[in-house]
Image (spheres, grey):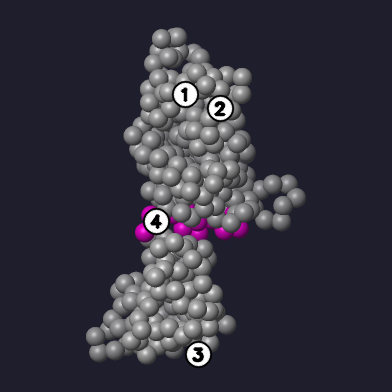
Amino acid sequence: MFLQVDHVTMHYPGASRAAAHSVCLSLTAGQLGVLIGPSGCGKTSLLRAIAGLEHPSQGRIWVQGRPISGPGLHLPPEDRHIGMVFQDYALFPHLSVADNIGFGVKHLAAAERRQRVAELLDVVGLAHAAQRAPHQLSGGQQQRIALARALAPRPQLLLLDEPFSSLDVDLRERLAHDLRSILKQTGTTALFVTHDQQEAFALGDVIGVMHQGRLEQWDSPYELYHRPATRFVAEFIGHAVFTQAQIIMCAHGPCVHTPLGEIDNPNECPLPSAYPDGQCDVLLRADDILHDDDSPVKGRIERKAFRGSEFLYTLRLATGEQVLTHVPSHHDHQLGEWIGIRLEMDHVVTFPRMS
C-alpha cells in the first residue's frame, strides 16, 4: 500500500470525544481518495495527522512502506515528502505565477527549476500566465497554481483540504474533473477532504464517509451509493428515505413487501430470519422510484426542487410514508397533485427497523 493509516485515534484537550477514533484506510499508488462527512466529523483532523501537523494519540501511519507516525515516532512535516493544498491557496502575492510554482524547488539548478515550472504550467494549462501576479488570475486559476506549486517538488503524497470551498458551484465541479485529470496524468497519489458529495464523486477512486470521528465506510463511489455499510452512510450519500418493509419467502426466494408494492426476487436480499419476523427498514433512493401515470400507487407532491433536467419531488403516500423521486423537468406537476409511481430497484438495502 502507498498510504496506510492503521487505527489512528486523535484526542484534543477538553474535547468530549475523539476527533478521530481508530481510523483505518489505505491508498494504492496513483489512487485518489476522498474523505467526506459533516462539519466536525474529524476528516480535516485526520488529514492534518497524515501531514504531520497534528500528533495522533494512537495508531500508525506509513507512506510507501516508511513509518511516519506511531508510538514514539512523529516525523516532522518537512521530512514526510508530502504536499498540501489549502482552502485559501496561500500563494505569495509578491511573486509571479512562475516564481510561486518554483518556490518549493529552489534546491534545483536554475535550468532544471525553469524546466520543472514550465512542465507544470503546461499541465495546469496556464503557460500563458507565467509572469502574471496571482491577483491577476481568477479563483480557479489560482487554485491550479496552488496545485502546481504543491506538485513541483514531486511529493510522495498530496493532501488537499477543501480545495474548492471558496469557488462557485459550477466552477467547483469543472475544476474537480480537471484536477482528477491532472493528478492521473502526473501519477500522483492524493487524499482530499471535502463536504461536497458531487465533488467527492467527481474526484475519488475511493471515498470515506466519516461521522463523529469514525470512518463509517471506505469504498468505491458505486459501493457507497448502492451498498452502504451503515444507516448513516445510506442517509448521507445521495437522496434517500427509509420505509418499513417485511421480507418473506416466496417460491423463488425472498421477497420484500413495501408500501409501494412488492420487490420480487431482489438482488442481495437477506433472508427473513435476518430480522425479527422479517420486519426491517428498506432504503429507497430517488432513482429507485419512477413516475408512472398508469401505476395504481400514487403519491401527493409535497415539495419540488428544480434541478434543470429534472425535478426532485418529495411525495407523501396515502399510507403516510414519504418518498423521493427524480422526474424529467418537462413533467411539471403542481404541489398537492397526486402522481403515479412505481418501484424499479436493482439493489435492496435493508437495516434493522427503527422504532
Provide the residue span drawn in magenta: 208-222
Name the residue tied to disc 1.
129
Mark nearest the camera among 2 and 3 is 2
Kindly report the distance in space between the C-alpha atoms of the residues bearing marks 3 and 4.
33 Å
Kindly report the distance in space between the C-alpha atoms of the residues bearing marks 2 and 4.
37 Å
Residue 136: give its label.
2
- Residue 328 in the image: x percent, y percent? 38, 69
User: Which residue extends farthest top?
Assistant: 110
Kindly report the distance in space between the C-alpha atoms of the residues bearing marks 1 and 3.
62 Å
- Residue 181 in the image: x percent, y percent? 36, 39
Mark nearest the camera among 1 and 4 is 1
Mark 3 touching mark 4, by CB under 8 A?
A: no
Asked if the magenta segment contains residue 245, the reply would be no
Q: Earlier in the sequence, mark 2 or mark 4?
A: 2
Amino acid, disc 1? Ala
Mark nearest the camera among 3 and 4 is 3
Q: Earlier in the sequence, mark 2 or mark 3?
A: 2
Residue 319: give its label.
3
Q: Secondary structure at mark 3?
A: loop
Amino acid, disc 2? Gln
Q: Residue at left 34%, top 34%?
A: 185
Amino acid, disc 4? Pro
